[in-house]
Image: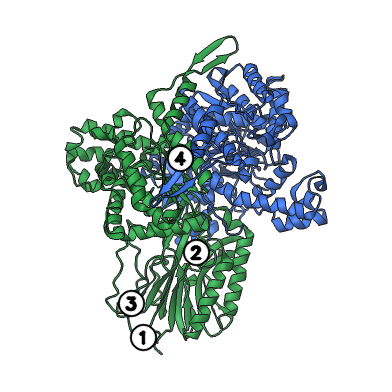
Chain colours: A green, B blue
Amino acid sequence: MNLISTGAVRLHQMTIRQGDPDANTRTILALMARARADGVRVAVFPELALSGFMAGQDWLDGSCLRACERGLARIVEASQGVAVVLGTVAAYRGRLVGAAVAAEDGLRVTPDESPLPFVPKLLTPQNRFDGASGFLCAGAVAAMEGVALHTLFSPFKLGGMSVAAWCGQALPRGYDPARQGAGLLLCLDTRPYTRDRPLGGPPAADGVPAACCCGTGVADTGKTLFVLAGGTQARWPDGRIGHAPLLHEAVLDFAARPPDEAVARTDHAAPRKVIEVLEHACRLQLARLGLSRVIVGASGGIDSALTAALYSRVAGPENLLLVNMPSRHNSSTTISLARRLAVNLGCYYTEVPIQESVELTRRQIDACVCERPGGKKRELSLSDFAVENVQARDRSGRVLSALASAFGGVFTCNANKSECTVGYGTMYGDIAGFFAALADLWKVEVWELARCYNAEVFGGEIIPQGSIEIVPSAELSQAQNVDEGKGDPLVYAWHDRLFAAWTERPVPATVEELARGYSECTVGELTGYPGDLRALFPDEASFRGDLTRMWQLYNGLARAKRLQAPPVLSLKSRTFGFDLGAAQLPILNEFV
Amino acid sequence: MNLISTGAVRLHQMTIRQGDPDANTRTILALMARARADGVRVAVFPELALSGFMAGQDWLDGSCLRACERGLARIVEASQGVAVVLGTVAAYRGRLVGAAVAAEDGLRVTPDESPLPFVPKLLTPQNRFDGASGFLCAGAVAAMEGVALHTLFSPFKLGGMSVAAWCGQALPRGYDPARQGAGLLLCLDTRPYTRDRPLGGPPAADGVPAACCCGTGVADTGKTLFVLAGGTQARWPDGRIGHAPLLHEAVLDFAARPPDEAVARTDHAAPRKVIEVLEHACRLQLARLGLSRVIVGASGGIDSALTAALYSRVAGPENLLLVNMPSRHNSSTTISLARRLAVNLGCYYTEVPIQESVELTRRQIDACVCERPGGKKRELSLSDFAVENVQARDRSGRVLSALASAFGGVFTCNANKSECTVGYGTMYGDIAGFFAALADLWKVEVWELARCYNAEVFGGEIIPQGSIEIVPSAELSQAQNVDEGKGDPLVYAWHDRLFAAWTERPVPATVEELARGYSECTVGELTGYPGDLRALFPDEASFRGDLTRMWQLYNGLARAKRLQAPPVLSLKSRTFGFDLGAAQLPILNEFV
């Protein structure tokens, strides 16, 4: 019979609750019941559909594994009248493996030629979660079983079909399940949303229907929150492709009639889509942490303005408080911009000046005499540069933290990825807060999203144009006077490209290679910078000096700062916290 | 000939510089030259002797791998007149593997029956570094090569001997290299110091000489600093064992005469040894970060007193500043204790009161009116509990940070493991600082080490007895008045044992199991608590309530706090930061 008779196979793009197998089991059982009622023969669920992705110690918590096993038993029992394929975690000789499993008529189904009741995941270094799982890879399982790797990937007999199913996008080299007689290919996957990389389609298959089934929701590894992108897809034998939407729960039936060509793929990288991802992630993050009220330190600049716009939509303006905290270096220009933003968003606004406290601190430190036995004394004094950091810490460590208690909420970290890369920020100061939603976005992307908010979301100038156009500045000294056009030491149009060439590629561009590129005019090719580098750096020496300083900051002091920074929302294929650091990178890299 | 003729085999317990293959290569070449001059036939070096242990992204930095390959080439070239065995990292089909390699007469030596020129590491879940390395395991390599796992572990022919060498403590199940004709067994290992677990001896061998060769120095994974313990050991065929010292560079020759039985193994868990490890680690940490001056916020309590004692020895009293920062809740008792400590240590001392600043903050927040368009207003006020946290943040985020700038140094985090477990501390307050040296020590261990400092290091009451005996208290409110004997909500003698049962075991004791243990009187067995639980909790309900609250804190709010906490020195087999959290654990565990 035709494998793709109406409704024969249903792909469930379900929301997976991280670390909650009982809830996920209930979701799956309800979806199976509906599938059975709809005459579906095979119900498909994503990778790790019971546990969600986790890492480190939590995998070793026996109660979670037992709950997954309990859940699976109930799902197997419920496979009367509808067969089921899903991804889960399996115990194997004292280790854990990511596993594709199947059941039908109330019994587990074993892959045709495999000695094991599951298909173990083939871990790959390209998959950012594989390394952190601590799972045993399929290669090691094959070695321990004494069988060829391909054997473990043989198809399941299911719903009258031969169904090849596995977790993750990789198959053993040279193995083509369609040639082994599989009539349906199912790739169960967990795909974090990444703006810089498309999601990838269903597995390659020659004249055979194929699909990838992906989860939605969020998952975190402590320092980094991931958005599970969804993006389930089905490819008909004639090559036509059906798409489930990004981010949201959906089902996609392998129906007899291929999908309408008009259902085009969403552009996942469009600014409007990134805003949707941001809002979706922050909404879920507030909900899972049990938070409703949010405070944003609003400087009048663009990072805090975008953050405020985001949370006005996520938490609602009635739960949002913007606070401006001027010192004597803050211009009336930026104070007015912060005030106007609050009025435009319809949220709460207040001002808490910090000059008095900063002066108290300066006075106290300057009056400090340190004594040692024997009458040795040392007098201390604060440098002007040190007072810049005092201001930043006064805002976060003193005012925002106390306001958060009083308002019954949390305060945000408004840092962007450009600042995070080189540690342009103050510990316990602007590098603080419950969550850093923008920390995977370059400064130029922050501007792009702010413009998109006004144009496509608000339909008007809610984020003041002044905040978009003003020179980026920390306003911590007169050298950063915005009214004189002075500001940050970073030239974002260039440095964003440079930092991306270091952080967003598997193999970063080297300082040597880039410095050579200056005289050979290849820096544009190496980084994608479209401008004239000579307008920024008159000669190679000045270019090399800037490069070296930035590289040393990125791998030096900025690492120490990121270690104590708030958790970050991942929007790229390499994010600070998980892929790039904090967690696992040494605080010191001798290679710098 | 006798395999263990005088000086035939030399084990080099070398200091490995993390991420610096060039420096490590120079060290190895110099040691090889000396070995050659001494007539050594086989020079042995530890696991990852070229790169040191690393994790995450740094492994993928091509320049480090290339430097390891360059270093290895020079070592192979230098193997004229002395054979060499060492651990390094090898590239294999686009992945990295931990590898034991050997060379003699200027050429690489391949294991007898292996298709590969190295022995890949058998990764195990028991080894805390294996998961983080992202290395391909030996099982997967065997599968990809299509050979039995044992084949990859066959011995090298080296120095006229058959030498089995591998990385890490594990060998393939059922594989006994001595039975395969190996006349010498060499386990190349990286062993972090752990107080709660002995280091383990050389590999089991029947009538064959065997050794483990381990490195010294420190290595960090960002959030956690590890001390490489050394502890190289050699076992003669008659069972006698020779030990290299812990922590420090040494060579151990497999000399013709077995070692004197009197060279006993050091007690690695003795308080005096732990102090040696603490000082060694902090000394190396300051040196590698290029720091010399240290500030300790000295409360008069025991955590800051121990920290101050430690840094007075590591940085020297002339580089140490103790600062007491009283609010109106601080007693003259504790202020005098802090002052006396500074006098005893001979270091700098100062006082910076915080009451004025705390009152300013309270006034500013209480005066805050938040307005929304349309005239909606909200008045804010700070609760007494919120003011407790204001004090803690005022000390670290305001005073200590500014003092660090003025003094030209860093300030320490004095948190202990008991506080870290349940998040008993304030973010940007006492949970701040450049490094948390005591954060893997229970409160009872802090007391133990303080007493040991006086008795065995200082030989007198340098840490005031009053700081050891005073009730532990944060002194943030009148409810924590030390002069009335009031203090922390933790009963350390009990809670330390409870928290250890959660954090320091592979499978943590469950709340359910412990609660049942109350009526069954098995809590002592489950946790090692020797006291009478009924003296603390009159009935099961009160016991269960406390258990549940602590478990929720440990897996809830404390996780979020640990995410932004300073890096921690590891002294146990499970440490916050690396094994237990921050880095990889989700901020939320649905299982709580």
Q: Residue furthest bottom?
A: A1
Q: Tell me residue A365's x, y (percent).
A: 48, 22
Given the image, what chain letter belongs to the residue carrying mark 2? A
Q: Earlier in the sequence, mark 1 or mark 3?
A: 3
Element class at badge 2 = helix
From the viewer's side, name the closer residue of A559 and A37: A37
Distance of label 1 from label 2 (alpha carbons): 35 Å
Query: Do the residues under discs 1 and 3 have CB atoms within 8 angstroms?
Result: no
Q: Tell me residue B349's x, y (percent).
A: 57, 19
Distance of label 3 from label 2 (alpha carbons): 25 Å
Q: Is residue B316 above or below residue A434?
A: above
Disc 4 crowd rating (10 Å Cα; few below 14, some 14-19, many 20+) is many
Element class at badge 4 = loop
**Disc 2 designates what residue?**
A138
Tag shown at residue A206: 3
Distance of label 1 from label 4 (alpha carbons): 57 Å
Q: Residue at x 80, y 44 (%)?
A: B530
